[in-house]
């Protein structure tokens, strides 16, 4: 058998160097193997032929059998079109083409039997089918009379007449050449246990399903395999790491923790906070190095959980460190934590880029002697000059601004890698988290502290600006502060900045007695911080900003979030922005301002925002509406996301199932040496080699 993986696509009969070049470039198809794994995006049932008299205008794509009675060329210039009057004896439909008229006239003959395939629409009282597929009866092989595959193609491909039909023909040729079965990629045990179709049969049926039932089985098999290897990769990697590194054992919960809990904690922990603390406590005592992702909606009280985890480290004579993505946030954490620890004998320091000279030296020295117990900071804490006596726990806040590489640098700050707690307010649906952060365990705070007033979200069209400004004025008169956010999307950065500037001018004019500050990503950090500080301190009543304020800023007195051009934001981003308000005791508002004309799915997005404050519900909806590729944080995660057939949004249950299958295998074969699994490890190795992203995390 020839080797599919390496066999160049250009050698497939009917392809050749020119078409191969297009396939390389447009679809990244290089080998026969690549082609075989280019799956259809839909199938159309061609098992039934309809009569023309049955057509009723509500039909999807259908198939007719008949002959062309006559051709007619209608219209002038760009309106020019070719009409073929087509009949099967029960009625007449018009087949219409707007392009390639000369070619078509040469190709199709009158009074010959054809199979016509397309979607009928009613036009001027007659049914017509625009740009139908037309095959002569002899072309129509019995195999393709069942479910016909449709392949995605690009504009460039169509120009080289590489349409779905052409790809279908290549698949036929390829499968004909495939005389022997391909090497199986799952073990006999897995195939038997989970009732999976053998690989070769699945590949045949994914392209040319013999029936709907066999298609379903083929899809299941291929999705299973795809998700299984994604999970096996992550779990294998996790297991290797566990075998290689021992974690520090924090065996006691001692004086510092208990003093804080009994004397300093100003309120009851929520049940969710208690549960998560128990999960963390278990990890820290286990001897395994903790790698835990803590998810909690904005305002759910993650900082407190982080602090109490750090106190566990202190009780065991370890130091702890907390990293925030910006100076402002680091500063806020520092203030909050100092306040929480008031009166306790714990030394906390703040280290950012702007801490210099003697002050910096003192902190660095204190870290080396162990006198500084908790260090809070920005990226500055991972610089080479920063060294600890015994770093036991690192908390990373708003993790998606920290790359995998930066996490790795932390490990070198200590003899053994410290425990790591990553906190994020971007609620990632469970299924996605399992794939993205599969090497992390996940804890969720799914409960807000009591007494919060839910934020009222209102959708308003931008032609009602006067009434919007009036309500803002009322809030400001009551002493509240207001955010006004503009979108900033890379490709249109210049235009967006102009919008922001204009918006700023406009707001300044509309609120002449207010101090309005302005923040955007193109400002120098110092300038940005100064503007932010005006708002944090309460001097400025209004902040006009781009999405840079999205992450973690806490100004409890800000009670209104206005989002301009809300239609341009994704759901998760809107939710993040909304989370900037609703932190104080007052009723807060989020006002989504949009154009009057909205696309259907935009309207849906906004409706979800108005309806619910639940970040997880929103994240699930976002995943369904947009698909995982667009979700925030997925790009930076460094994890492969090139799924060919499985769909994270729709195949969540299967993902969970295969994860357990993979987990069982890794647990039973921790060193990857059982002979019955040899095939799996070999296949995994091959996939890691072929996939840059997969290799990057391992
Ligand atoms: P986030 O999860 O967004 O980081 P924070 O940790 O900033 O949330 O908490 C938001 C606010 O809620 C803070 O002012 C914090 O002190 C307060 N808080 C946290 N836990 C509780 C609790 N159990 N009961 C009451 N208030 C709490
Ligand atoms: Mg926070």
Image (cartoon, rainbow, N blue to C red):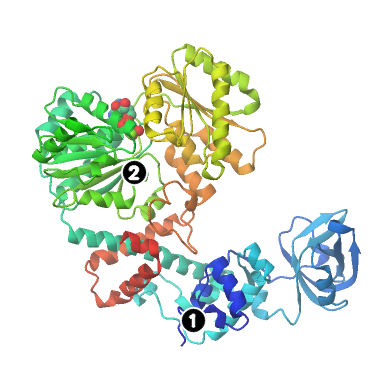
Label count reads 2
Q: Residue at x 33, y 71 (%)?
A: 685
- Whether residue 485 is visible, yes or no, is yes
> Of residues 180 and 34, which is closer to you in this image?
34
Residue 80 placement: quadrant: bottom right
The residues tagged by marks 1 and 2 sit, at their Cα atoms, a distance apart of 43 Å
316 left or right of 241 in image: left
Is the residue 279 above or below the residue 486 in the image? below
Element type where label 2 sits in the image: helix
Residue 399 is tagged as 2
380 left or right of 460 in image: left
343 left or right of 605 in image: left
The percent coordinates of residue 331 (x first, y second) are 29, 29
Few, some or many residues within 10 Å of mark 2 (<14, 14–19, 20+): many
Element type where label 1 sits in the image: loop
The percent coordinates of residue 637 (x first, y second) are 38, 52
The percent coordinates of residue 347 (x first, y second) are 14, 30
Q: Residue at x 45, y 79 (%)?
A: 6
Give the mark nearest the N terminus, 1 or 2. Answer: 1
Is the residue 12 above or below the residue 642 in the image? below
The percent coordinates of residue 610 (x first, y second) are 53, 32
Few, some or many residues within 10 Å of mark 1 (<14, 14–19, 20+): some
Q: Which residue is mark 1?
A: 7
> Of residues 211 and 628, which is closer to you in this image?
628
Q: Residue at x 34, y 26 (%)?
A: 450
Looking at the rendered image, the quarter that the C terminus falls into is bottom left
Residue 250 placement: quadrant: top left
> Of residues 573 and 415, which is closer to you in this image?
415
């Amino acid at each position: 058998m020839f080797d599919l993986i390496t066999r160049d696509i250009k050698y497939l009969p009917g392809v050749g160097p020119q078409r191969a070049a297009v396939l390389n470039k447009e679809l990244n198809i290089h080998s026969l193997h690549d082609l075989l794994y280019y799956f259809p995006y839909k199938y159309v049932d061609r098992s039934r032929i309809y009569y023309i008299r049955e057509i009723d205008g509500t039909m999807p794509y259908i198939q007719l059998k008949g002959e062309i009675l006559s051709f007619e060329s209608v219209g002038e210039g760009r309106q020019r079109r070719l009409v073929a009057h087509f009949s099967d004896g029960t009625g007449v439909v018009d087949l219409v083409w707007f392009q390639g008229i000369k070619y078509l006239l040469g190709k199709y003959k009158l009074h010959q039997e054809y199979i016509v395939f397309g979607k009928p629409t009613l036009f001027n009282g007659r049914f017509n089918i625009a740009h139908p597929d037309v095959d002569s009866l002899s072309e129509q092989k019995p195999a393709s009379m069942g479910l016909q595959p449709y392949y995605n193609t690009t504009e460039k491909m169509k120009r080289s007449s590489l349409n779905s039909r052409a790809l279908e023909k290549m698949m036929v040729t390829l499968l004909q050449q495939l005389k022997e079965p391909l090497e199986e990629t799952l073990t006999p045990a897995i195939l038997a246990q989970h009732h999976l179709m053998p690989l070769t049969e699945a590949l045949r049926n994914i392209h040319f399903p013999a029936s709907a039932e066999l298609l379903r089985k083929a899809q299941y098999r291929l999705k299973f395999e795809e998700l299984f290897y994604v999970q096996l990769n992550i779990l294998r990697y996790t297991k290797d790491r566990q075998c290689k590194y021992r974690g520090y054992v924090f065996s006691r919960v001692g004086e510092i923790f208990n003093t804080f809990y009994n004397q300093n904690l100003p309120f009851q922990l929520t049940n969710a906070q208690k549960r998560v603390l128990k999960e963390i406590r278990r990890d820290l005592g286990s001897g395994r190095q903790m790698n835990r992702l803590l998810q909690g909606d904005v305002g759910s009280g993650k900082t407190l959980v982080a602090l109490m985890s750090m106190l566990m480290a202190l009780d065991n004579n370890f130091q702890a460190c907390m990293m925030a993505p910006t100076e402002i946030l680091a500063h806020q954490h520092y203030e909050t934590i100092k306040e929480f620890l008031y009166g306790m004998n714990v030394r906390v320091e703040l280290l950012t880029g702007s801490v210099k000279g003697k002050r910096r030296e003192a902190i660095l020295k204190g870290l080396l002697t162990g006198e500084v117990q908790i260090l809070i900071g920005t990226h500055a804490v991972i610089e080479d000059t920063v060294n600890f006596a015994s770093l036991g726990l690192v908390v990373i806040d708003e993790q998606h601004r920290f790359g995998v590489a930066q996490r790795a640098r932390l490990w070198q700050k200590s003899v053994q890698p410290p425990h790591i707690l990553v906190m994020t307010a971007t609620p990632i649906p469970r299924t996605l988290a399992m794939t993205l952060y599969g090497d992390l365990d996940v804890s969720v705070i799914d409960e807000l502290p009591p007494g919060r007033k839910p934020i009222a979200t209102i959708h308003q069209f931008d032609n009602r600006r006067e009434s919007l400004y009036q309500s803002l004025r009322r809030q400001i008169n009551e002493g509240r502060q207001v955010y006004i956010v503009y979108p900033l999307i890379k490709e249109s950065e210049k235009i967006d900045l102009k919008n922001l500037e204009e918006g700023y001018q406009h707001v300044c004019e509309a609120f002449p007695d207010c101090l309005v500050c302005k923040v955007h990503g193109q400002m120098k950090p110092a300038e940005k911080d100064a503007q932010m500080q005006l708002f944090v301190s309460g001097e400025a009543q209004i902040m006009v900003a781009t999405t840079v304020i999205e992450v973690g800023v806490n100004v409890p007195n800000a009670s209104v979030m206005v989002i301009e051009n809300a239609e341009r934001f994704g759901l998760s981003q809107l939710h993040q922005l909304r989370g900037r308000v609703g932190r104080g005791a007052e009723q807060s508002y989020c006002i989504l301002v949009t154009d009057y004309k909205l696309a259907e799915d935009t309207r849906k997005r906004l409706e979800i925002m108005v309806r619910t404050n639940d970040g997880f519900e929103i994240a699930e909806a976002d995943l369904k509406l947009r698909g995982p590729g667009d979700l925030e944080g997925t790009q930076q995660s460094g994890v492969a996301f090139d799924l060919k057939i499985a769909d994270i949004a729709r195949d969540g249950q299967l993902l969970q199932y295969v994860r357990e299958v993979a987990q069982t295998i890794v647990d039973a074969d921790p060193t990857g040496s059982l002979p019955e699994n040899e095939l799996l490890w070999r296949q995994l190795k091959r996939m890691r080699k072929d996939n840059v992203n997969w290799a990057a995390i391992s």
